[in-house]
Image (cartoon, coloured by chain):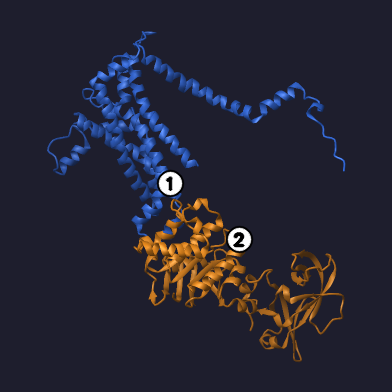
Chain colours: A orange, B blue
Amino acid sequence: MAEVIYDHVTKRFDSVVAVNDLTLEVEDGEFLVLVGPSGCGKTTALRCLAGLEEVTSGDIVIGDRVVTHIPPKDRDIAMVFQNYALYPHMTVYDNMAFGLKLRKVPKQEIDRRVKEAAEILGIQDLLNRKPRQLSGGQRQRVALGRAIVREPQVFLMDEPLSNLDAKLRVQTRGELIKLQRRLGVTTIYVTHDQVEAMTMGHRIAVMNQGVLQQLDTPENLYDRPANLFVATFIGSPAMNIFPAQVVGGDGTVQLVAGDVKLEAPPSHRNRLADYVGREVLVGIRPEDLEVVAGNPESEGGDTVRLPVELIEPLGAETLVHLRGPAGTLIAQGEPRIHLDPGDVVTIRVRKDHLHTFDPQTELALF
Amino acid sequence: MTTAPVRTIAQVAPLPLRQRVRLWVESEPVLAYLFMTPGWLILLLFMSYPFFLGIWISLTDRTVGLPTGEFVGLQNYRDLLRDGVFRLTVLNTFIYGFVTVPFKLLLGLLLALLLNQAFRLRNVLRAALLLPWIVPTALSSLAWLMLYDPVLSPFSWLLKDLGLIDASISFLGSRGHAILSLCLANIWRGTPFFAVAILAGLQAVPQELHEAAAIEGANAVQRFFAVTLPVIRGIVVITTLFSIIWTFADFQLVYVLTKGGPANSTHIFGTFAWQEGIGGAGKLGMGAAVSLYMFPILAVLSAILLRHVRSQEA
């Protein structure tokens, strides 16, 4: 077990910068998720750590060793690939034992470790099968088992769940979390799925276009996104974003977008003071737009009236698409809400959950 | 609860004849045979008929120029077994096949591994690799004929310039030299086939398998044996079997380079059959018998090959 450090790591492929000056520390035993859209550099960052890609500049540290120029086999890591990369001609047992045999681990020890890992993963009965005789979920377990038996300092996982069907993915997700907590091995996990990121990671590193956007706990990423990209990437349905004019006057600050006028809560007044007379981007999550039943009187500037465009009943909740001042706003309504397109509804805005961003830098205003 | 009346087949009016015929023709078993008919016809006409005609001719003493011959039973086959040239031909064919194929396999594998690496001009080299395979053998054999010329051979010149030999080598002048020379030319011609086939196999080896093995501690050689070879094994076996069959049935290279000489000592089945049947004596029956001695060997090889191809498909 070990900590992992990326120290100003940059990886270029010809003119493309896949990873740009990445600096981050992963603590010993931590489950860190690298998340971002495809092409954001997360997989490249992982492959650099594995030694499958040579870094262009910067250093990588595993434990107390700088491994930047050390070949993969000497980095004491194990990797789980998206397609599992099981050796097709070997049995499950041999697949798991292969790395140990190469390292000249005594036969009895290999046997002990393989059987132990097989038991943890519930694949004892599959040890004599070939990969092609296994289901996707079973293959995934074998790939995990192959990593576990090595007892490495760090697990690297590259979208290991993305080839499973939705139900199995949720189930395996939970098992993986329990397994990691139990083994306590530092784990770096790459995914493009923000639900996986939120549920699995102790901390999450959000990447975009090769640049680390924010490194934080799931709660902080959700509640205090550092910029517009993180705000819209984390959370489903995505945060509503619309431009608004900042209007100041005798101790109050108002955000004005079309007919909608919102009085900024006291906590926001300071940060918005510099923006009076200018435009900012306002972000509000769907669950912070409450569909108010009936037709109450306006209450102190935290409600707005908007027409309904579309209703999406999802069972546990209903997504209400509203025609906002600049494009559609999505509000998360009660599960059995009865609305029709064209209805005008009252929406209460949880103003203390408002996010504001600078339109140029797209950084959050704190 | 009442059940709805069910109409039995007898109650349904029979279809008109034309429609019934159409239905019958379009039913899967019938249609399948219909589609296969052209293939069967071609096979019958161009493969089975000559094959059985060849068997019949081999049982006669028919010669070129005469319309028929006498039925002689297995006389031709018996005569061949006593013929020293034929026995030498059999030996030559086996040498030719079993000496060249391992070299072609090994060189082809090495070339494929090289060409599977990323480097500049790789595609140009890959294309160039196919040249020996694309050039008609009769033509490239002529080039080899010049290379093996007893007086003008560039090989001899080069070796003499390097001071390794004193006199020109008579590449095709003795049986031993001639067979080696034939093998060399055959290896040159056959290697690209192995290289291209194996290269295709190598490209099907998932990169992730190599990466997984590299992380687990395998060096390049261990990765070759643990990852690459098992994945391309099928292609290697099939390519090898094909090559053995083609080498056994070769004709052009030997015909152009030595015509079976000197003194009939470098014949293989193809050239000897031609010489017996058409070229020299014109004994069609004898030539056919020579060819048919090849049949059981090739049949066994083909059977192994087909079995392997099927197991690959499974």
Q: Which mark is residue A168?
A: 2
Q: From mark 2 to mark 1, how far is it between C-alphas? A: 33 Å
Does residue A163 sit above or below B160 in this rendering? below
- Label 2's element? helix
Q: Are marks 2 and 1 on the same chain?
A: no
Dot 2 falls on which chain?
Answer: A
Quarter-wise, where is residue A241 in the image?
bottom right
Give the side of residue A175 with respect to residue A61, left or right: right
Kind of residue sitting beneath label 2: Leu
Dot 1 falls on which chain?
Answer: B
Give the side of residue B138 with respect to residue A267, left or right: left
**Percent x, y for residue A191?**
56, 66
**Percent x, y for residue A159?**
54, 63
Give the side of residue A41 with respect to residue B17, left or right: left
- Label 1's element? helix
Dot 1 surroundings within 10 Å: few (below 14), some, or many (20 or more)? some
Quarter-wise, where is residue B302 in the image?
top left
Q: Nearer the viewer, mark 2 or mark 1?
A: 2
Kind of residue sitting beneath label 1: Gly
Q: Quadrant of the C terminus of chain A?
A: bottom right
Q: Which mark is residue B201?
A: 1
**Percent x, y for residue B92?**
26, 29
Residue B43 in view, yes or no? yes
Q: Residue furthest front?
A: B1
Q: Which residue appears at 84% of the width and 66% of the height?
A: A342
